[in-house]
Image (cartoon, rainbow, N blue to C red):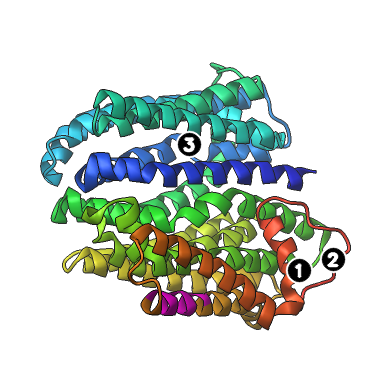
Amino acid sequence: MPAQKLLIVSLASTFRTIVQIALMPIIGRVLGPRAYGQMALVFPFIFFATLLAESGLGVCIVRAEQVTKELEGTIFCFSASVSIFLISLLAALAYPLGKLLGDPLFPALLLGTSSILLLVALNIVPMALLWRRKQYNIIALGDVVSTLGSIGAIATGVFFGWGIWSLVAQQITIWTCRVLIAFIGSRSRPRFLFHWRIIRENISFGSNLTASSMLSFIARNIDNVLIGGLMGSETLGYYALAFQIVGLPVAIMSSSVYYHVLSGISEASRKGLPLSEHFLKALRSVALLTSPVMVGLAVTAPLSIPFILGDKWLPTVSLLYCLAPFGFAQAMSEPIAGVLIGMGRSELKLKLGLLSSSAAIASIVFGVFFSSTTVALGISLAEVLSWLFALHKALELCKDASINGVLRAVSVPLIAAFLMGCVVVSVQQTFFIDFPLGVRLVISGAIGIFAYGAILVGLFRDQISDDIVLIKTALGYKPIKGIHKTWWF
């Protein structure tokens, strides 16, 4: 039942992602690349502050043997205090940072968006309680309500001509809805209790997770700061949109894949059972879903970007080509994270995060002196290499797994996706050239979906039934009992 309920979370994430895609034309056409880039310059500072406010302590509630009022109150008071401090710090730094980055609107945007930090602090305890109690329906409801709220905020902002402040209102609305649903669903309330002992007992595990997340976050966002500061907000707008598009698979699957692997590895480890089954099945399921999406986004980009967003967004196309490998590697990292945390190796996750972040930052610093395309190529290469090293460490923990097993697990989706891309490009270059842009996009998408399915059925027919089960599992379905082990074991 819990695994089936995770499907609700995945569906809510899918709904949120669909809405994001639907809002892209509105934001892109109404606000333009410059406004998009200005918010992309602000968000790294805000989201970095949210990581500090959370401090990984929400996970401690999920893992605690017993949740007490003192534990809830201590985590709330600690997070709220950190949030207030961070809001004050951002207020003091807003104007100097704006001068440094060369954006006169930056200070006002930073101050306006920083208000969500208090909402983040309010959300930590009730959301952790919902995850602990496996109240996935409430979590999904919060996702849906906040998504609908974001639609309302954008629509209101566009109607009244708020411009870029529509995006600020959107973020505040999203977090307000999340907090309200979390409090109502968990029946929790802020508790003003604080004990340093509780912080000392939990800060070690939480700090490893937080430090790992912070390193990953810095590596993921330093490119925004450097591109925005050195190349301008408009160039950053193109880059940030491409980055958001390739992150769509992770937005849909991350929670369900991570928690499925984490729970499966944790249980298998406690019982002394083989670990590879959960890990390799998760890798294959992510590859089955992500590889055709990444290839499809790349081969249809020359049609989809001008049709959906307009010709002024055409520079995004080349960036999508370069960032597609990054999107694939990022999605494939979720099962590895589940293995590391499922086995209690948060310190190893921190070390791997330090390695991958260092590689990404080095590639960004090098690439920013050339072009945004060079930056995109650099972080894609760094992400793929970091994923391979993290995979090696995960295989060392899952002693019954091997690199050959991984290759057999992911090779079929990769081959099918590559052939699908070749078919779509060939059709685009040969037929329908004189058709309207939208018609060519629809035809390309339909051909890609049909080609991927046909290639899987035609070349790898024996694995199709198991693959369907794996995709359902990745999205939250409970695996069917009695299914035979797939061919790579």
Mark in the foreground, 3 or 2: 2
Tell me the number on the disc at residue 158.
none
Question: Identity of the amino acid at label 3?
Answer: Glu
Instruction: Give the residues drawn in magenta, as a range.
Output: 420-428
Q: Which residue is mark 3?
A: 54
- Per the model, the C-alpha gap separating discs 1 and 2 is 8 Å
Residue 489 in sight from this viewpoint: no
Q: Residue at x 50, y 25 (%)?
A: 177
Tell me the number on the disc at residue 466.
1
- The answer to whether the residue labelled 1 contacts the one labelled 2, judged by CB atoms less than 8 Å apart, is yes
x then y, percent, for residue 129: 65, 31
User: Mark 2 Cα within 10 Å, few/some/many (few <14, many 20+)?
Assistant: few
**Per the image, is 421 magenta?**
yes
To which quarter of the image does residue 465 belong?
A: bottom right
309 w.r.t. 137: above or below: below
Tell me the number on the disc at residue 483.
2
